[in-house]
């Protein structure tokens, strides 16, 4: 019989301990919630004006110049962006006119900003072949900040001046044609050093 008493005593002690432990764990609690945590993405919107043919010239002769003509680059969004300019020029007739022409890109005039490219005396951003060897004219389209990249804050714009010259000492081809395409690549600046 002592085994029954021991088992009964253990069961009673366990039940008593559980009752004491449960009654001793009373805790006051409180809770607050913070709803409506919303996330949206921003955007960047790069546009140019004009959207086609900023500089053209028919019947160009050595010593002639097309431009300088203004091109407005705009950021139509609220986020800051940076952009680069590249170009590709083609010689469909294989006469090499693109290699005889010189492209110059400058910022807005210093002396007459109201007439953006009138004096063509802004800061020079590029001067060289109509399409540079690697296509890069201003900045670099590689992700991240690169030397020469242009920055535009949200809803801002800037005017660039484009001029193409056929040097008077050029022994360029006759009855030749070339077409250039300028590409503006933009990317966010936020979290993109």
Image: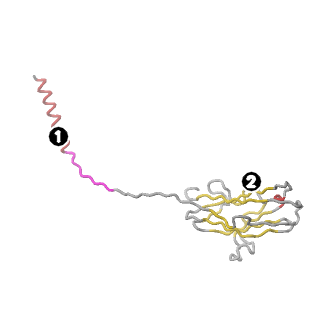
Per the rendering, the mark at residue 36 is none
Name the quadrant of the C terminus.
bottom right
Side (left or right) of 58 relative to 42: right
Q: Where is residue 5 drawn, in percent x and y?
A: 11, 27
Name the quadrant of the N terminus.
top left
The segment highlighted magenta reads 24-32
Q: Name which of mark 1 and mark 2 comes first in the sequence.
A: 1
Outermost residue, left direction? 1
Instruction: Give the dominant element type of the magenta stretch: helix, strand or loop.
Output: loop
Q: Is residue 53 magenta?
A: no
* Element under disc 1: helix
Q: Foreground residue, 50 or 153?
A: 50
Q: Is residue 28 magenta?
A: yes
Tell me the residue that label 2 is attached to: 134
Residue 137 drawn above or below residue 114: above
Q: Determine whether label 1 and label 2 are within 8 Å by CB.
A: no
Q: Residues within 10 Å of mark 2 (few under 14, many from 20)?
A: few
Q: Residue 54: which quarter of the image?
A: bottom right
Kindly report the distance in space between the C-alpha atoms of the residues bearing marks 1 and 2: 83 Å
Residue 106 drawn above or below residue 14: below
Residue 6 drawn above or below residue 132: above
Give the residue displayed 82% in from the left and 62% down from the top: 101
Side (left or right) of 53 relative to 158: right
Q: Residues within 10 Å of mark 1 (few under 14, many from 20)?
A: few
Q: Where is residue 100 drawn, in percent x and y?
A: 84, 60
Q: Where is residue 118 drawn, in percent x and y?
A: 74, 75
* Element under disc 2: loop
Tell me the residue that label 1 is attached to: 19
């Amino acid at each position: 019989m002592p085994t029954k008493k021991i088992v009964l005593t253990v069961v009673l002690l366990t039940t008593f301990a559980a009752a004491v432990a449960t009654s001793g764990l009373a805790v006051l609690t409180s809770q607050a919630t913070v709803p409506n945590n919303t996330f949206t993405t921003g955007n960047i919107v790069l546009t140019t004006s004009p959207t086609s043919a900023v500089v053209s010239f028919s019947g160009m002769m050595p010593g002639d110049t097309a431009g300088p003509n203004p091109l407005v680059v705009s950021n139509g969004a609220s986020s800051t962006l940076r952009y680069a300019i590249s170009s590709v020029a083609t010689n469909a007739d294989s006469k090499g006119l693109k290699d005889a022409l010189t492209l110059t890109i400058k910022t807005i005039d210093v002396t007459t900003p109201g007439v953006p490219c009138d004096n063509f005396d802004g800061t020079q951003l590029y001067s060289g072949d109509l399409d540079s060897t690697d296509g890069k004219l201003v900045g670099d389209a590689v992700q991240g900040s690169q030397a020469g990249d242009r920055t535009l804050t949200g809803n801002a714009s800037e005017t660039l001046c484009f001029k193409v010259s056929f040097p008077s000492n050029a022994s360029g081809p006759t009855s030749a044609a070339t077409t250039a395409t300028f590409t503006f690549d933009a990317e966010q600046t936020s979290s993109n050093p």
